Image (spheres, rainbow, N blue to C red):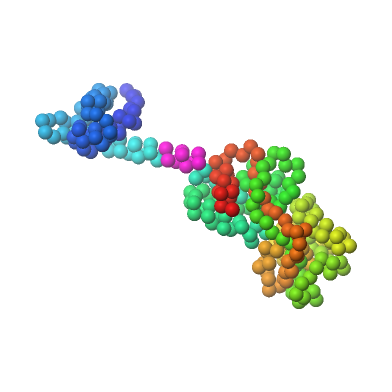
Amino acid sequence: MVFMVDLRLLRQFVAVAEELHFHRAAARLHMSQPPLTAAIRKLEDEIGSELIQRGNRTLGLTAAGAVLLAEARRLLQQADHALVATRDAAAGRTGTVRLGYVGSALYGRLPSVIRRFRQANPAVRLELIEATSARQVQMLREQRIDVGVVIPPVFDAEDMQLQAFDSDRLAIALPRAHPLAQRDAVNVAALADEAFVLWPAREGRGFHSQVVRLCAASGFTPRVVQEAHGMHAVLSLVAVEAGISVVPASMAGFRSAEVAYHPLAGAEATFELQLCLRADETSPAALNFTRHVAEHR
């Protein structure tokens, strides 16, 4: 015969079995003794066997009671674990966050955010995926990542939500052997005759447009001789003297023995990074990550 036992009834039995005293067990459970005695009688009736040996002074466990005590402890431990696991999952303290990011984000705030989030949520698995802003938006729509770190503007993004994340500025990147590299300062106008290495406009239209606008303000259109996907690839080409570029100033430590960086002054040379996620995102772990970012600015 299959029967269901209330977990509360099992907890009451465990208290009596461990205390071997109804009064002490009732005090431990913050209840009066008569209902506890009745509960144990009910449990014995449901099982069809005596569990507690009752005497004038002491109580003991029957053979059936000893077995039930061991099994009840195990079941209650599993129930407690299930409850904790469920609450952790609902709060986003467990699970997986697939985090996309533009390459330059690794040189700004992102590493410290990841470190603090991992310390606060050690059971959450973080998967890091480097991709351009446009690629991240596509991956978000395809549900291949949960959160992205992008450079705005994000076009046709009615199905996305954006959150402030970090700020940066542009810098001119030159091969160390370039004649301009040894100057204390280099402005955009000095690049009019240079060969540029850039990234495809479709992969980061906001950033690409900003560089083109800076050049236009100095009276020229950049002569792009080669394109590369991602800032690391762009700077690697600068390092081998394929051309010069304009890149995030935060990346000034990348291949610095081969590339000279000259940050650009002025508000027109600054840009923002934002968190991007689906407007209808429901993953507790992903939402926990975005809350963490907002609370630790």
x then y, percent, for residue 295:
56, 49
Q: Outermost residue, left direction? A: 56
Against 1, residue 230 (above or below) is below
* Magenta-drawn stretch, dominant element (helix, strand or loop): helix
- Judge left or right: residue 199 versus residue 81: right
Quadrant in the rendering for residue 111: bottom right
The number of discs equals 0
Closest to the observer, 116 or 39: 116
Instruction: Classify residue 77 by image quadrant.
Output: top left
| Residue for point 85% across, 60% down | 217
Q: Residue 268: x, y in percent?
A: 77, 58
Residue occupying the point 32% across, 30% down: 8
Q: Residue at x 75, y 65 (%)?
A: 264
Residue depicted at x 76% and y 62%: 266
Whether residue 49 is visible here, answered yes or no, is no
**Measured from the top left, where is residue 10 in percent x and y?**
30, 32
* Residue 13 shown in magenta: no
Left or right? Give the position of 157 relative to 52. right
- In this rendered view, identify the residue nearer to me: 134 or 270: 270
Magenta stretch?
A: 83-91
Work out whether 256 lies above or below 147: below
Q: Quadrant of residue 78?
A: top left
Residue 196 visible at all: yes
Q: Residue furthest front?
A: 266
Asked whether 89 falls inside the magenta stretch, the response is yes
Q: Is residue 12 above or below residue 181?
A: above
Quadrant (top left, top right, bottom left, bottom right) of the N terminus: top left
Q: Position of residue 83 (x, y in %)?
A: 42, 37
Q: Is residue 63 left or right of residue 9?
A: left
